[in-house]
Structure formats: C-alpha cells, structure tokens
Amino acid sequence: MRTLARPIGLGLAARGEPSDVVGWARQARDAGLESLWIHDSYYERDAITFATSVANALADDGPGEAFRLALGAVNPFTRHPVVLAMTGSALDEVLPGRIVMGLGTGLPLRLKQMGIPYEPDAAVERVSAAMDTLRALWAGERLPSAAPGLPPIQPMFPPTHRIPLVIAAYRRAFVELAGRKADGYLARPAESIPSLRGILERLRASATEAGRDPGAIETAGYLLSLVDRTRREALNRAKREPFVIYMMSVLSDVSLRRAGFDPELRDRISAAWRAEDYTLAGSLIPDELLDAFMLCGTREDVAAKALAFSVETGLQLPLLQPVLQEDRQIEELIAAAGMYAALPASARWVAPTSEADGGDPASDHAAAAMSGGPEGAAVLADRSARGALADDRRLGPAQAVRRRLGATWEILRPFAYTASVVPVLAGSALAALDGRFAWAPFLAALLGAVLLHSGTNIVNEIYDVRQGIDTIVSPRASHALVKGRLTERAAFVTAGLAFVLAIVVGAYLIWLRGPAILVLGLLGLVGGWGYTAPPLQYKYHALGVPLVFVLMGPLMVAGTYFAVTGTWSAVAVILAIPVGLLVAAILHGNEWRDISEDTRAGIVTLSSRVGKEWAHYSYVALVLGAYMTLGVAVAFGFLPAPTLLAILSLPFLAQVVRSAELGATGQARAIAMIDLQTARLHLAFGALLVAGLLLAGILRG
C-alpha cells in the first residue's frame, strides 16, 4: 500500500451513513494516509458501531498494512472501562495491532444534560483509573470486584495486541496526565498554533518530569478544515456553518488570548449562537479568527496551514477533520494530505495581506501563499497573490463561464418553480376535464409563468441584498450577488430579459384570447416587480403572503384556465384556493424562519408583525387549510372525487408540521429548511391534484 512521506490522518464524526465512512476510510488508506480517527458526537450516531464497520472493511488488507483505526475519543463517564476493554478487544480481533483508543470526558455540558455528575478534579482521576483498568484487563489480569464479597472481574478474552491509549483533553491536569502515563495526546479541534504549542510543551515537560522520553508520546490533533474553490469562498461558507459558529463560541479565554483575541468577541458570538441567531453569529466572526483556529481555503491552503501546525508546534500527526462530511470535502482533504506530505519542511504559510498591509484593495484578503523553496512553489503553482471581487485566485475562461452560469442558476432559484408550474398545470388539467384543453395556449401560459417567476426571483434577490437582508452569512439565501459571482447590473439584465420574453409570450396570448390577458399580464408583471422593488415593495410591508396567495392562486389558476379555454370558470377559483394556500405557506415559512434577519434589516413582514407564536399558527393553518378546502370542495361537488388523490401527500404534510412544531418550541434549526420542505409538499399535493383531475376526465370520458 502507498504511504505518504509525512504522516497525516483523517478525522471524522460518527455521522451520516456508515457505508460512506467505510468508503472514505478506503480512500484515505489507498492515498497513503496514516490513520482514520472516529469520535463520539453526542446525540448523533455511535462511534464504535462506525469503527466496527470500518474495521470489518479493512480486515481484508494484507498482513503488511499499517493503516490504523482510532476511537478518538470515547468517554469513561458514559462507557464503563470494563465495557471499553471489551470493545477494544473485539476491535483488535478484527484489525489486529491497528487499533488506537482515545479517552476523554467530553463537554461537561453534555454530561450534565444526561444527568451525569462531573467534577474537574475527579474527572482526571476517573480517566487515569480507566487507563489502569483497560491495561490490566487487556493483559489478562483479574481485577477485584467493585462490590465487596463478589468474585473478581475475570477477562474472558485473550490478551490483545498493544492498543495505545491516548488522552483527548486540553485542561492542564489532563495534559500532565498524558505526559505521565498515556501513550499519546490528542488535541481538540479549533486549537490555535500558539495554544497548541503551549500544550505540547507542557506535555513534554510532564513526561520528562515523570522520567519518560517525550518523543515516545505520540501527539495528534484534529485540524478543523473546510475546502472550497477559493479561500474567500471557504471563509464565507465557514461563517454559515452552525458547527463552526459553535466551535468559535466555546473557545477558552486562554486559547483566545494566546492567539491575540479578546474573549469579549467570543462572548458576543456565543450569545448569538445560544439565541440560535446564526446569521448574526456568523457576521461577528472575522476572517482572522477562522485563520487562527481552523484551516479554510483551497486544498493548497489547507496543506500549507497543516504544515504550519506541524512545524511550529511539533505536532506529529495532523488529523484533517472536515466541517462538512461529504464526498467532495473528503476528496479535497485527501488531496490536501498528499500536498502536505510533499511540501518541504522549510515551507511556511504566509498570512493573507490586506489593503492596510499593501495588498490589493479589491479584496480584504489576498491568497495564502507558500515560501521556502522551489518544491513549495511547484506544489502551489499559479497561485494569485491578490484577490479579486469575492475571489482570491485567477480563474481560466472556462472556469469563469461555469462560474457565471452557476451564479445565474443559483439566483434563479429553480427549486421554487413549483409555485408557478403547479397553478398552471392545475388550471390546464381542469380545462382538460371540461374537454376544452389546447396545447399551444397551455405551453405559452406555462412558459410565461416561469419567465415571470424567474424575473421576480432575480429582482427579489437584488433588493434583498440592497436592504441588507441577504448577506454572506445568510444560510439559505442565494450568494451569487454577495460573493460577486454575478454583478447587480448583470442580474438586472437577466431579470429584464425574463420579463421581456414573458411580454412576448403574453402578446401571443392577447392575440389569441383578447384584452383580458393584457390585464392578467400587467397584474403579473406589477406583482413580480413590485414584490421587493420600489415603489411598491409589498413584501417589506407585510403584504407578501396575502398578495402571493392571490397572484399565484386564483389569478394564476383561473387565468390559465381562461388562457387555455377562452372562458372563465368559478370552479377554477375554488380549485385555486388549496393551491394558493400552499404557495403562500412557502413564503410564510420563509418569513417565519427569517424574522430576526428581516427585523434587523428594518423591514416588516407578516411574520414579524404578528410575532413568532402567531407566525407558527398561521403557517400550520395555511398547510392544513389546503387539505380542508379540498375536502369541502369535493364534499359539495365543486371538484370531482379523484382529486382526493392529493391526500396521498400527507407524509410531506406530516414532515412540515413536525418541523413547525419543533420550530415553535424555539428550535430554530428545525425550520431552517421549512421553505424547501413546503415547496416539496406543494409539488406533491399539486401533482396528485392534477393527476386526480386528469383521472376524473378519463372516467368521465
């Protein structure tokens, strides 16, 4: 198997699908990484179960394979040392001689949540005693019973191969314990170079005092990492991640001061985090704080900063820990690990320059660069020393085109097209039920609706950015404009093109159906432009939800029926009510989730006006009202019975109601995706409703 010239490992949480972690372990092994470390993350998945899956997958390796698997770390407060000894023995049977076990107490907060008493001094003694117990049992020794008069504890498994015991903690007493009796030390994620340097110096001093060789104590450390195409985008993405915000909110006073930061900054971030106001918390995090405590940037940046941690602190085994456990991030970090191993020891990570330092004023941060010899220059070839607008490296023509197309796609928000497509399909299906369907006006109505919706989405994005509602740390907004991937002028041109094409389509329908279409078209144009653009800006005056219900409910469904058939239908208005209620629910869910951001930006939405409690009630009323009005319409004979097929969308309804109920209890994360979830409900409900209308037409025929 391939082995890198300089050891480096991968750190993962027990999160997601075990099969994914198994696949990533194989990729890391095949790329020459030294080890995989899996840590417990309370209230998620079980690290030992994941480690067992990985051990089984790696068990077929040849006898000379040295890729290690580590539990980094498990907790003797939540797992009795006897149970940990059994776990280590079983894993050693699967993967002989390649298991590492880290021990730590985790966060006292988590233990208190579970009702487990925690005292700092007693915790050190407990971990120390756990180490003694593990080593004795793995050596095959019997231990006295904890209760007098009972038989001793007799290990009924064969002695294991050597399983190194590593201390995972940062308090002084634990570091000294690691120096006295552990096989290694594991540094927590989000540790700065100055702080880690001090910790490892204390570790070595403790080992020397205990008569041990400091070099014999392995040192490893999680390096929290996030990779993107540019350093700027990686930093921006990090500020939107709740886990990063949390890690920045729990940094210790000592660690902050050693890195040159005032703990008051941490306190402000922590206050916003505890209030679950992640947008505010992210906006409080400066780039320099992320640079000090994690690795953010391109794969080259990550490799360079990992080397800085290793060289400047004496850390033997850096562990790249992805903020986002997904295929692309893992692939990028494995590539960064290869670059790290190839860099010369003399290479250094150079802090990005700013305008004040003589850097490019177009960017607050220039690209991270390496110095130290031709090898380093080769690895980091063609890196730009200055940034452009929201970017910090040169992009080739093909990359620039892809970037522009991607930004346009992002600002169009195609996932929201269900709000315009479903009403058109519903009105057209009703026309088919009445035997009056025509393809040409249907396709024109569908195209016109999507074009109007596209223009509306873009104008909405422009003015939300202008108002300060959408910022670089807004978690669910499009970031095409705030990242500079699309200029405001280009966005206006794209929106204008969409509206012009909609007018062209509308002209055809006017020629076909007469001046009534002109009125409908003007209402659609004014409604789309005036949603956030002056002079109306009705979204900012608590009128967004009711007007969207009218525009994308009765107006669009009944208007489509007229465009397709040339006649009006009262039934189309009734059909439009459940459709419009769900469209309104998409917007209302978005406004409910964003109450804090909207209020901070000085705008008034329906949710901010009625308050969080009534916003919750209103949202539930909208989604349940769609089903109730459908049932009433069928009961009174306005709609045919097959339209009750829409009830099959109840699982989607249950999902959004569950999210809403959790959100009402203060769990902001539960409604982070409420708009997207409601859009899926709207699509499922609408598709089944349309299917019911078509089925009714077939049965009638």
Image (cartoon, helix red, strand yellow):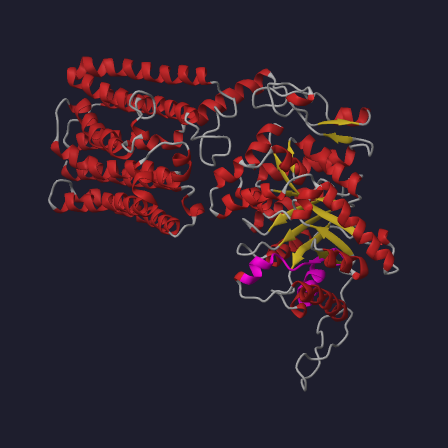
Quarter containing the C terminus: top left
Kindly indicate the quadrant of the structure image that contains residue 131: bottom right
**Occupied quadrant, residue 206:** bottom right
Q: Is residue 471 left or right of residue 181?
A: left
Q: Is residue 97 magenta?
A: yes
Q: Nearer the viewer, residue 684 or 308?
A: 308
Q: How many marks?
A: 0
- Farthest bottom residue in view: 149
Closer-to-camera residue (654/234): 234
**Residue 511 at x, y = what percent?**
19, 12
Q: Is residue 215 magenta?
A: no
Q: Which residue is depicted at the point 23% across and 19% down?
A: 521
Asked where in the image residue 326 lies, by quadrant, the reply is top right
Please report the bounds of the magenta region as a residue range: 85-112
Is residue 66 something one can see in this rendering? no
Residue 589 point in image, percent of width and height = 35, 40
Give the position of the N terminus as an image quadrant. Answer: top right
Tell me if 527 is positioned left or right of 672 in this view.
left
Q: Is residue 336 above or below residue 618?
A: above
Where residue 371 appears, as percent x and y from the top left, is 78, 26
Picture residue at 23% right of the left edge, 22% below the top:
523
In percent of width and height, residue 259 lies at: 70, 40
The residue positioned 15% from the left and 41% from the top of the image is: 640
In this orientation, does residue 435 appear?
yes
Q: Is residue 609 above or below residue 124?
A: above
Lateral position of residue 642 relative to residue 187, left or right: left
